[in-house]
Image: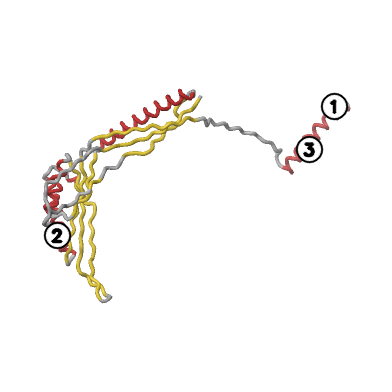
Amino acid sequence: MNNPLKTSLFTVLFVFIGLFLFVKFAGPLPFSVTSVTTTKDRLFTVEGQAEATAIPDSALISFGVTKDATSVQQAKDEVNKITNQITEDIKKLGVEVKDIKTTNYSVNPQYDYAFGKQQLRGYTISADMQVKLKPIDQANKAIDLATKLGATNVGGVQFVLEDSKQKALENQARKEAIDNAKEKAKSLADAAGIKLGRIIDIQENGGVQPPVRYALMKSMDAAGEEQKPATELSPGENKISVSITLSYETR
């Protein structure tokens, strides 16, 4: 073997031995990788709005019965007698059992305080029930019936739509809001010289306007006697407002 070749082999061997010893005692050779992430943040955002209205077809009415008695059982019997009678007579109006429900039933002790001592005077029992009536003119009859049978209070009245009609109205308002947003986006983009790409985000804001509650009040005549005209309710319209935000890519 000639000297140049021998020298080259020793050189390569020396380099490998040096690298082995460096990695063993100093760790792996350091190196870096540069990562570049690009995002497309040029968005065109526009909002569309729409409203849909419908005449409600059902009414929710709350009745309450409150009685005081010296014993729990006596108060309970009086309350149950009235609420059961109201329930039976309302069912005769064509109301289904599933549309009559008890929303509250409470028993509260009543005390008298004298000379630093409390003495049990009796008990107050309150029962509240909610009735859904359709058609709405049945609500007028139900209110008159309940007050005649002994309901001590009649709560707010809510006029609502059946679930299927409510959803249909929401979908109608939602579609019209999207169409409104698209029309507005095209008009603004054309005016600004912007080319719109695909829709990459959609958000719904706002929502359904809750049913309006109507308070019912008893009226008195000049002699202080309670007037008893027939109840007349006016449902008006229910309104659903929807706001849609669309985000477009721009080109």
> Split into 4 quadrants, where in the image is the N terminus?
top right
Q: How is the image coloured?
A: secondary structure
Residue at the (19%, 67%) spot, across then down: 122
Give the camera-side residue of 60 and 24.
60
Type of amino acid under label 2: Glu
Label 1 packing within 10 angstroms: few (<14), some (14-19), many (20+): few
According to the picture, the residue beneath numbered tag 1 turns out to be 5
- Could you tell me the amino acid type at mark 1? Leu
Q: Nearer the viewer, residue 206 or 120?
A: 206
Frontmost of labels 1 and 2 is 2
Query: Is 125 on the left-hand or right-hand side of 32?
Result: left
In the image, residue 18 lies at what x, y percent?
Answer: 78, 38
Which SS class for mark 2?
A: helix
Quadrant position of residue 99: top left
Question: Element at badge 1?
Answer: helix
Residue at the image point whose x is 88% and y is 26% from the top: 2
In the image, taking residue 101 as reference, residue 37 lies left or right, namely right
> How would you rate the neighbour count of disc 3 (Cα within 10 Å): few for under 14, some for 14-19, many for 20 or more?
few
For marks 2 and 3, give the CA distance. Answer: 103 Å
Q: Earlier in the sequence, mark 3 or mark 1?
A: 1
| Residue 72 placement (x, y as % from top left) | 19, 64
Q: Residue tagged by mark 2?
A: 78
Q: Of marks 1 and 2, which one's residue comes earlier in the chain?
A: 1
Circle 3: residue type = Gly
Lower sequence index among marks 2 and 3: 3
Q: Is residue 223 left or right of residue 103?
A: left
Judged from the image, the secondary structure of the residue bearing numbered disc 3 is helix
Q: What's the mark number on residue 18?
A: 3
Tag in front: 3 or 1: 3
Comparing 229 with 200, the one in front is 229
On the image, which quarter does residue 208 sit in? Answer: top left
Question: Dots 1 and 2: beta carbons under 8 Å?
Answer: no
